[in-house]
Amino acid sequence: MSGAQSDSAVVSGAQGTSLSPEETAVVSLPQEPDLHIFAAIVENKFGVLARIAGLFSRRGFNIFSLAVAPTDDPAYSRITIVVDVRNTDVDQIAKQLDKLVNVVNISELHPSDSLERELMLARVGAADLGAVTDVISEYGGEVLDHADGEAIVSVSAHPDRLDRCERQLRPFGLHVLQRTGRIALRALDADEPAVGMTA
Amino acid sequence: MELTGAQALMRSLEMSGVEVMFGLPGGAILPVYDPVLDSPIRHVLVRHEQGAGHMAQGYAHVTGKPGVAMVTSGPAATNIVTPLCDAFMDSIPLVVVTGQVAMSAIGSDAFQECDTTGITMAVTKHNYLVTDPADIPRIVAEAFHIATTGRPGPVLIDLPKDVSNAMMTWYWPDSVELPGYRPRHEVDPAAIAEAAQLIRAAERPVIYAGGGLLKARAAEALRELAEMCDIHVVTTLMARGVFPDSHRLCLGMPGMHGNYTAVTAMQQADLLINLGARFDDRVTGNPAHFAPNAKVIHVDIDPAEHGKVRVPEVAIAGDAKVAIEALIEALRPGDGSAVADALADRSAWKSTVSGWQEQFPLQYDQPSGGYPLKPQFVVEQLRDHTPDDTIVVAGVGQHQMWASQFWQFDYPYTWVNSGGLGTMGFAVPAAIGAKVGQPDRTVWAIDGDGCFQMTAQELISASAENIPVKVGILNNAYLGMVRQWQELFYAERYSEVYLSADHPDYVGWAEAMGCVGIRVESAEEVVPAITKANAINDRPVVVDFRVDTEEKVYPMVPAGGSNDDIILGPEGDADAALKGSAPS
């Protein structure tokens, strides 16, 4: 029965915006996603994103977040895909991705030797603008706009820190939340492991 | 030289070495059909676009060259999705060109518009939407490169009508540059050494030979490895013929309808040497119970196959022929001593295996009065009364299993069938494509009555184009394999499986399509009909073999079951099967 209980708890957690940070932490524990980060360099061609999304869908891989933008060379894009691998073999994800002709290379970024960032924009209640500004400053963010008791804030930080920031903003009233999904680069002192051959 | 996109396409196909293409014209592909008239490439006009795809597959199966098909947009493109998926599942190299509505109309729900690249993304190795006629030579060169290298597969080129009509300056690329596509050919020497050590130490080794060996043209290398190390070989449905059935080391087909020895030898092996196979569920049964005590060496050119179903002890990514040759080199003693001296003692295993072969042969019982005619008897007579290098093509179902079980495959590239996708209706068009690819060989399709009704119209294409294939229908009046499952697993509740032996009149239908039609109702008529069919070489022949409705395919491992639970015959256990009569 404990499984059923935690399931229903997660459902209410997902629906509710009024859970306190402590409650959120408690209910999310048994269902903790096992997130792995893959960075792919892909040819910047028509339909590449559809190929990747289609591959994930038909192989049953679970995308947690996905960020894509051209690299310094406009012929290529870098895609950062965060995958929940609870039900998936990590190797299969890299190998199947590598089989796509437009995927030039793929590497897995281990959190311990990578730098991760994510950007959040949020529209929050700001009856007490000073208090909101205090929270945002703590995370190195800024207030972009404020009017009529609301503010739009921006924070760029490690995704775990954004989670904390988000929880701290909740009591003010989190009216609209937009996060970009993480991007990541391997740390300068980390080895570059090669994943991938193509067939 | 200025060419239209359409001319550039045909010229690019010529430059890619295409000799034959299969297709059917229509609106959006019309510009390309004009230069077809001026091209040295032979074009075979089909009656349905699915036929074009399967013909291209049959051609590719028997020649090793990529099959080429060309059809128009919309419904034609959707009709060829099944062959694309079939080729994708069985790693058959195809290049398929589809017409598309004009660029300006794309996205407007135009007449015969469909999102062909979107629809086929999941069933092609790669696909292209051409947006500039100047890209055509490059894309065609890339398409053939991708289709034929690494793990082969189908590539689709979607060509909008205005791109076909626009002008371009002709060129032909010297090479292809695909930064994201680097098929791995060479193998890792450390993995080879590790594999060689496992082979030396194994007491119960089995070579699990898959269709990848045929793609790698590795039949000779396989034979050398098997003979050198004295290891038994099972040949999967996709690999029939890669190792001679008549060879003392050949155990035949494993899997759901494999013979007892092949299934059980894999199950009890201590080492499986998987060469170009993919642990398909039809081979493994329930993978949790498959070959529980075996270590695994897995050679595959697609590294994604390693660990997809079964985690191997040694994974070798690369070309199967290169890998086998490296294994042979690694296993050959440097000091001139005999290979056998370095191998573990396998005498007990070998006598166990030969005991199984003796005890549990494939069997059926053809009643002496000749009636009812047994389908296995028909397959055996076909086998015995056709040239040894006859190409056999099957559809999907009971007849396919009987053909694979009772034919003796002694040559590679003599067996064409739909393995992974299991496409009913594959046989007739694939046989036509095979005959086009190997016009000097006898090509027999062994088909089912249900399958035949799905694509029989392509025999009109065959008679119109003088492609004299022979089709033997094992007509049991039912969707036989479905009937078998309903009999065994659904308490004999036969739901929607009866087709009738007489409706349609297969002989009349064959004659109407320009073929010779022959009907066979009892055992003594079988050989004369085969002899007559073999003598006809100016048109296709269809033989309607009226076979026993109730005959089932055995052995059988129920779907999802363990291969230990193999059912040998109708009585359901080994002892009962032993009492049955021997095959004639």
Image (cartoon, rainbow, N blue to C red):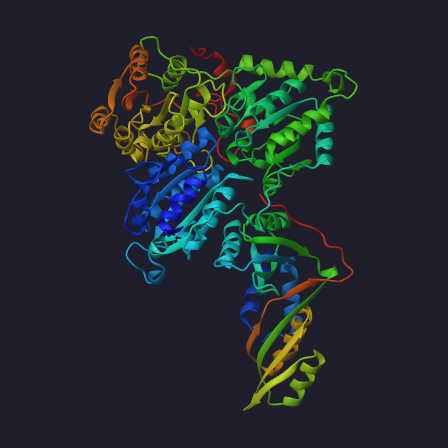
Q: Is residue A130 visible?
A: yes
Question: Can the viewer see residue A1?
Answer: no
Residue at image point 55% right, 23% down: B262
**In the image, is residue B563 above or below residue B111?**
above
In the image shown, does B59 or B234 lie closer to the viewer? B59
Quadrant in which residue B478 is drawn: top left
Q: Which residue ends up furthest to the top in the rendered image? A: B368
Give residue B230's position: percent from left, percent from top.
Answer: 65, 18
Q: Is B26 displayed left or right of B375 in the figure?
A: left
Is residue B264 shown above or below B108?
above
Residue B231, x across and y down, in percent: 64, 20
Count of picture labels: 0
x and y, in percent, of residue B271 in the image: 66, 28
Residue B140 versus residue B82: which sits nearer the camera?
B140
Residue A29 picture quarter: bottom right
Residue A138 located left or right of residue B387: right
Name the quarter where the C terminus of chain B is drawn: top left
Query: Along the line of sight, which residue is nearer the eye, B416 or B20?
Result: B20
Outermost residue, front direction? B1
Report the side of B20 relative to A102 (left or right): left
Quarter residue B350 falls in: top right
Q: Residue at x 58, y 14 (%)?
A: B248
